[in-house]
C-alpha cells in the first residue's frame, strides 16, 4: 500500500491552529492522531515541514498531509468461529463466549477475540492502534456477552467518544451470593490497584483510585442467591465484580472477588453483557443489541430455581 496524500488550501481571514484545522479536514482521525502525523514530519505548510501541532496557519497557506498505511500489527489472524450479532461498514458487534481473552497479552498470544476478528476481517489490522485493532472497550476473560469493534478510524473515534462521554447504555446480568442491602440502588466506590496484590483491583479510598459508578436492580430473588441487572455508568476494570463484593453479595463463581468454592455448579463467574444501547456512526437514533444468556448460565439459573 502507498501513502495517501491530502492537500488543503487555507482561505480564512482569521488564523487558526494547524492541528485544529486538520481535524476538521480529516474527521476520521482524532486530534491525537493528527498531532502524531505532525510530530512525525508527515505534514508540510507551504512546502516546509510543520514545526508543531499548534503552529499558526494564515489565509493563503497550502497544507499537505502524507498519511502512511496502517503498520502490520504482527497479530496472527485465526480461523475462529464468531457469534456476530450485527455488522455494517463501520463496526462489528460480537457475542463473546466466556473463556475467550479479548486481546493478546502475556500468556495469551493466540485464540483471542482480536485474533478471531482479524481472521474474519483482515482490514481491521491497525485500526485504532497496532496492539488492539478495532477495540473500544473490553470484557473480562470469563465474562460473556456483547462487545463492539470498529472497522475504520472514523468509526473508532466515534465509538471511543460514545464510551468516553458515557452515552453508551450497558446492561449486565449477574447472579450473586446472598442479597444486596436494598433491592435496587447505586454504588459509588472508587476502583484502583490492590496495594497488596498488584494483579488485582480493589475498592480504594476516595482520591486513591478512579471514579466508579454502577446502578443495579433485582430481577429475581432466591433463598441464597439474587439475579441482578447492572448498569455500569463508568468502565473500570472489574468494576461490577468489585461493586458486588462491596455490596456484600459477590458474583457466583468469582474466585478472585467472591467465594473460593462456588455455591452452585459453575465453571466461570456468572456475569454476562446482555444489552448494549449505542448510537452508531452516521445515525441519530440509538440502536439496541442483545445477547441472551448462554446455555451454561441458563442451566445454573434452573438449578437455583429448582433447589431454592
Image: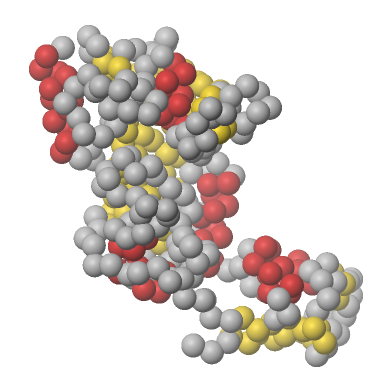
Residue 125, x across and y down, in percent: 43, 71
Residue sitting at x 72%, y 68%:
35
Quarter of the image for residue 207 reads: top right
* Foreground pick, 243 / 287: 243
82 lies above or below 307: below
| Residue 239 visible to the viewer | yes
Q: Is residue 184 left or right of residue 77?
A: right
Question: Along the horizontal axis of the image, is 303 left or right of 158?
Answer: left
- Give the answer, above or below, for where 24 lies relative to 47: above
Viewport quadrant of the C terminus? top left
Q: Is residue 89 above or below residue 236?
A: below
Q: Nearer the viewer, residue 23 or 11?
A: 23
Q: Quadrant of residue 240?
A: top left
Q: How is the image coloured?
A: secondary structure
Q: Would you say 131 lies left or right of 287 here?
A: right
Q: Position of residue 104 (x, y in %)?
A: 40, 57
| Residue drawn at x 58%, y 87% as measured from the top left | 3
- Please provide percent x and percent y for residue 111: 29, 58
Q: Quadrant of residue 293?
A: top left
Q: Residue at x 32, y 28 (%)?
A: 255
The answer to whether residue 228 is seen in the rendering is no
Above or below, 94 relative to 262? below
Amino acid at each position: 500500500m502507498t501513502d495517501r496524500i491530502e492537500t488543503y488550501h487555507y482561505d480564512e481571514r482569521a488564523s487558526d491552529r494547524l492541528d485544529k484545522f486538520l481535524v476538521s479536514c480529516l474527521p476520521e482521525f482524532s486530534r491525537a492522531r493528527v498531532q502524531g502525523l505532525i510530530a512525525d514530519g508527515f505534514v508540510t505548510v507551504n512546502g516546509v515541514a510543520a514545526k508543531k501541532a499548534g503552529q499558526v496557519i494564515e489565509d493563503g497557506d497550502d497544507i499537505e498531509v502524507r498519511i502512511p498505511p496502517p503498520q502490520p500489527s504482527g497479530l496472527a489472524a485465526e480461523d475462529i468461529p464468531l457469534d456476530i450479532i450485527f455488522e455494517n461498514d463501520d463496526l462489528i458487534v460480537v457475542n463473546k463466549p466466556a473463556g475467550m481473552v479479548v486481546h493478546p497479552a502475556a500468556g495469551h498470544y493466540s485464540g483471542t477475540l482480536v485474533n478471531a476478528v482479524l481472521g474474519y476481517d483482515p482490514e481491521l489490522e491497525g485500526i485504532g492502534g497496532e496492539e488492539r485493532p478495532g477495540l473500544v472497550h473490553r470484557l473480562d476473560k470469563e465474562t460473556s456477552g456483547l462487545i463492539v469493534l470498529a472497522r475504520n478510524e472514523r468509526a473508532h473515534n466515534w465509538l471511543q467518544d460514545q464510551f468516553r462521554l458515557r452515552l453508551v447504555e450497558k446492561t449486565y446480568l449477574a447472579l450473586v451470593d446472598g442479597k444486596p442491602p436494598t433491592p435496587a440502588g447505586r454504588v459509588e466506590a472508587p476502583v484502583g490497584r490492590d496495594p497488596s496484590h498488584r494483579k488485582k483491583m480493589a475498592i480504594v479510598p476516595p482520591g486513591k483510585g478512579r471514579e466508579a459508578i454502577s446502578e443495579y436492580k433485582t430481577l429475581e430473588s432466591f433463598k441464597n442467591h439474587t439475579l441482578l441487572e447492572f448498569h455500569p455508568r463508568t468502565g473500570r476494570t472489574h468494576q461490577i465484580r468489585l461493586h458486588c463484593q462491596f455490596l456484600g453479595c459477590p458474583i457466583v463463581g468469582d474466585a478472585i472477588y467472591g467465594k473460593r468454592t462456588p455455591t452452585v455448579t459453575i465453571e466461570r463467574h456468572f456475569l454476562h453483557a446482555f444489552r448494549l444501547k449505542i448510537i452508531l456512526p452516521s445515525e441519530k437514533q440509538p440502536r439496541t443489541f442483545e445477547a441472551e444468556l448462554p446455555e451454561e448460565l441458563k442451566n445454573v439459573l434452573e438449578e437455583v430455581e429448582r433447589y431454592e
